[in-house]
Each structure stands twice: as structure tokens, then as C-alpha cells.
Image: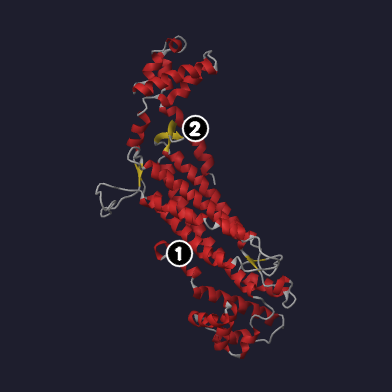
Amino acid sequence: MIERYTRKELKNIWEDHNRYSIWLEIELLAAEAMEKFKIIPKGVVKKIRLKAKINPKRILQIEEKVKHDIIAFLTSITEKVGKDARHLHKGMTSSDVLDTCFNLQLKQSGEILLDDINKLLRSIKTQAIKHKYTLCIGRSHGIHAEPITFGLKMLTFYQEFLRNKKRLINSIKEISTCAISGAVGTFANIDPRVENYVAKKLKLNVEPISTQIIPRDRHAQFFSTLGIIASSIERFAIEIRHLQRTEVLEVEEFFGKKQKGSSAMPHKKNPILSENLTGLARLIRSSVIPALENVALWHERDISHSAVERNIGPDTTIALDFALNRLSNVVKNLNVYPKKMRKNLEMTNGILFSQRILLELTSVGFTREQSYKIVQKNAMQAWKENSSFFDKIVSDKKIINKIPVNKIKKLFDFSYHTKKINIIFKRSLKN
């Protein structure tokens, strides 16, 4: 990712120096295990640790000649360590190092993303509770439906990101495996106890069976989860963008005193952060299909997945980390306009109470079909004429003959639509 969308915590995980450091640690831990099981001479690892140095520039110079990153890495370490380096990589294959390292980097990234989600959940929860009873219009197909509250709107996102948190926890667990099983995964040249030792030290699980690589269905689940989280971010961003439209203006992204909205039009305040999140979500989701296609590799191993993962590993986790933090700040600093919400509720002159009239008519003897026809006729007239729906209803003799006016007045009550909110909040926040 470019610096503009990169936060330091994630960037550090994917830096070349960190990757080579993890490679060295895997090699050293494997050697430690071999010492323990008397496969190599005792004391070798201590000597290597003292002398081994990571030199990314030198590794790349060697790789230019040998065209193999692990061999270039080992050659570079040997230049510093000397003959004791021959005990590194004993019985191992490149994928033992590459795959274990990649999974560890994904685990580390995933744990930061979990922290990001927790931060976002706190921001959403605060807004949900604050606006628990802030009335606004609910919309279906983009059209005014019935009243809800802004708190309920926020609560839907809270629950969605709770589900995303669970998905990510499961995906981190799925990806947290280690394979040190040698060529084609048979352990022919390495003791399985070495793999157990390395896995325990790195706080990873042993891959039950690796073909020479760790199976890529694990990675497909991980990146698919990131894609789902990105879609949730986009859903939230689109909601903010819609609600900030001039004709709606129920919420608005925070706009700083010195901020500029347009190079041409000084009056503009645009939802640029939410638009940016929509774009980032597209980018993050673009990694899902390649991750799924990486599952189908040839036989025990090929490297068609390698170039894909070298790109989507850092790019996708970095982009999602940035997006989650940006969304959290947008939600935390969101300007909410209850008065405009109320104004929008009232702009349709009461037709949003049409269902209440419909249900009341069915309760006094009309069939549903009759009730619907009567209410729809009055609602459409009120909408067309920009007149009071209440006035239309109390002027309809069919209705008045069955329902007294004072009863009809009670049907036009906004609080009716908030009476069950406590139940929804209680069951949604119990986790």
C-alpha cells in the first residue's frame, strides 16, 4: 500500500527486515529443537544468534544472482556466521520457512485488526446509546417507510461488527498454523518433534498435514473474512453518504474549521471520508477471488500462489486496518441532526402512519383488501396534493363510520414506534 493509507503498526509487520527476522527466528528455533533432540551439536544456536545479522540489501543482491529468496537469505546469514550456519535449514524446505512466516504475519495483522474492530464497536455503541430515542424515518428502497430511531440504525452496525469480530477470531485461529515437514511434507529428513517445538515457541498450531505447503483453504477463509468486513464498512459508509445528502442532511461528517470542501465551490462540505471507505472496500474485496483461486495448486506444491500472497498479504491487511480506524473516527465525530430528522419525518404529512390505519380497519371488520384500498387511496391523494393524511382519513366516511376521530388521533403517535426499543437494545448489547 502507498503511505497515504498505511498505519505504522501494520507496516512494521510487513517490512522486509521484519520478514527476514521471522525467517531467521524460524531457522534458529528449528536448530534449537535439533540441539535438544541431539540432531546437531549442542551450543551451535548460541553461536549463530551472536553472529547472525539481517542485511536486506545484501539478501536482495544475492537473490539477483541465485533467483531464490531463501537461498539468498541463508547465504547472507552464512557470510556473517561462518561454518556453523551449515546446521541451519537442516532437512527443511523453503515453504517451511515461507509459509510459517506468512501465517505468523497474518496472525499478527489479524490481532491488530481485532483491536481496530473493538475500537470501532465502542464508537458505534456510544452513538447507539446516545441516540436510542432519536426519531428518524426508516427507508426501504430509499423511500420513506415508518419511524425508527438513529440509535437503532447504529445498533444494526454494532451487531454486524460483532459478527465480524467473531469471524475474524475464527479466521485468525484457522491461519495460525506452522509447518516444518520438509520436502513434500513427509518428514523424511526432519523430526516431527522439531515442528512441534517451533510451533509452540511461535504460539502457532501444528499443521496436521502439509503437502510441502500449508493448505491454502485456510488463507482463503482469512481473506474472505477481510472481504466481508470491508463490505460491512462500505454499508456503513454508504449510509452516512446518503444521510449527508443536501436533501436529507440528517448526519454529516465532522468538518474542520480550516477544511476545504471544493476547489471551485466554497460552500461545499463533502462526505469524502465515507467515499474513501467505499473505495477502500472495493480494493480489499479484490483480494478474495485470488485467495480462493490459490487453493487449487498443483500436486504437493507450486508457486502460482506466491506472487499473489506477497501482494494481498500486506496490501489487504494494511488497507483494512486504515479503513477500520478511519470509520471509527468518522462515527465518533459524526454530526447528528435530530431536528432535521424530525423535519424529514413530517415532510410526508403523516402518510407514514398508513399501516396503523390499515390494521385498525381490519380490527373493526374490514377485510385486508378493503382496508388496503381505502388507506392507499387516501395516502396517494395526500402525497399528490401535499396535504394532511390525517385530514384525509377523518374526512373519509367509510373510516369515520367505524373509527371515532379521537381513536384516529391516537394512531398518529410517533411513540408507538419506539415502544419495543428497550427489548432490541437489551438483546443486542448483552454480548
Question: CB under 8 Å between callouts 1 and 2?
Answer: no
Q: Earlier in the sequence, mark 1 or mark 2?
A: 1
Q: Residue at x 52, y 13 (%)?
A: 364
* Residue 387 circle label: none
Mark 1 closeness class: few <14, some 14–19, many ≥20 residues within 10 Å: some
Q: Quadrant of residue 342?
A: top left
**Which residue does the numbered mark 2 point to in the structure image?**
420
In front of the other: 390 or 212: 212
The amino acid at mark 2 is Lys
Viewer-nearest residue: 89 or 359: 89
On screen, residue 298 versus residue 338, left or right, reads right
Q: CA distance from mark 1 to mark 2?
A: 46 Å
Quarter of image, res 299: bottom right
Q: Amino acid at mark 1?
A: Met
* Left or right of 199, for residue 168: left
Q: Is residue 62 shown above or below 419? A: below
| Foreground residue among 74 and 264 | 264
**Residue found at x 44% / y 34%:** 138
Q: Nearer the viewer, mark 1 or mark 2?
A: 1
* Numbered tag placed on residue 1 in the rendering: 1
